[in-house]
Image (spheres, grey):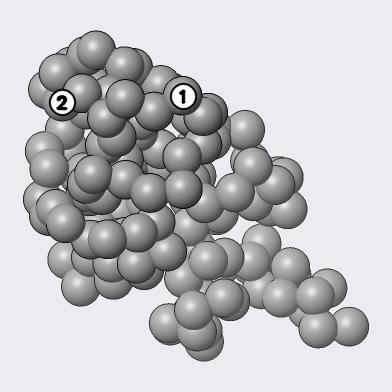
Amino acid sequence: MGIEPKEEGSSVAGPTMVHEAESFNYREDPTDPEEDVIKGMVIGILLVVEDVKEPLPASFNDVALVTEQRIVTRHLGDVPNAFVNLMGLQYMLNLDYPKDLKYTFEVIQRLFMGIGLDSCTPRVHSLKNKLLS
């Protein structure tokens, strides 16, 4: 069984907009057990596939959320659904964003999803003004 995790990110361009380090990470570990793959993962989306030849398969055997090196929910169906659940989980449990992607997650939550829009940090507020001008 192959495992393809996506850790701490939504897009490669996201961190660049708010001047953060490029921390988007994509790994393909075709034979590693889940415990080894999620080791060190602060927050992320775990994509599980079997016997796939393409670098980015169209369907997955399982899509799961990982927080603090633990799988917290499984069977989310697809990546967009998993991502929305990840953002909701962070908001509901009041989890801190990973330090190296703090502003990226804040932009996604506050500007794109409209959650807590009136309590942006100055950096994100500045980006909002630039996007709206």
| Image coordinates for residue 7, horizontal then vertical, percent | 39, 37
Judge by depth and name the residue closer to the eye, 109 or 56: 56
Residue under numbered circle 1: 53
Quadrant in which the C terminus is drawn: bottom right
Q: Is residue 26 above or below residue 100?
A: above
- In the displayed structure, does residue 66 sit left or right of residue 113? left
Residue under numbered circle 2: 34
| Image coordinates for residue 84, horizontal then vertical, percent | 36, 68
Three-letter residue code for mark 2? Glu
- Point 48% across, 57% down: residue: 105
Q: Nearer the viewer, mark 1 or mark 2?
A: 1
CA–CA distance in space, label 1 to label 2: 20 Å
Element under label 1?
loop
Judge by depth and name the residue closer to the eye, 8 or 65: 65
Three-letter residue code for mark 1? Lys
Judge by depth and name the residue closer to the eye, 68 or 27: 27
Element under label 2?
helix
Q: Is residue 81 above or below residue 29?
A: below
Residue 91 seen by the camera = no
- Point 35% across, 59% down: residue: 78
Quadrant of res 8: top left
Badge 1: few (under 14), some or many (20 or more) residues near its Cα, within 10 Å? few
- Point 46% across, 40% down: residue: 57
Mark 1 or mark 2: which comes first in sequence?
Answer: 2
| Image coordinates for residue 49, horizontal then vertical, percent | 29, 34
Residue 49 seen by the camera = yes
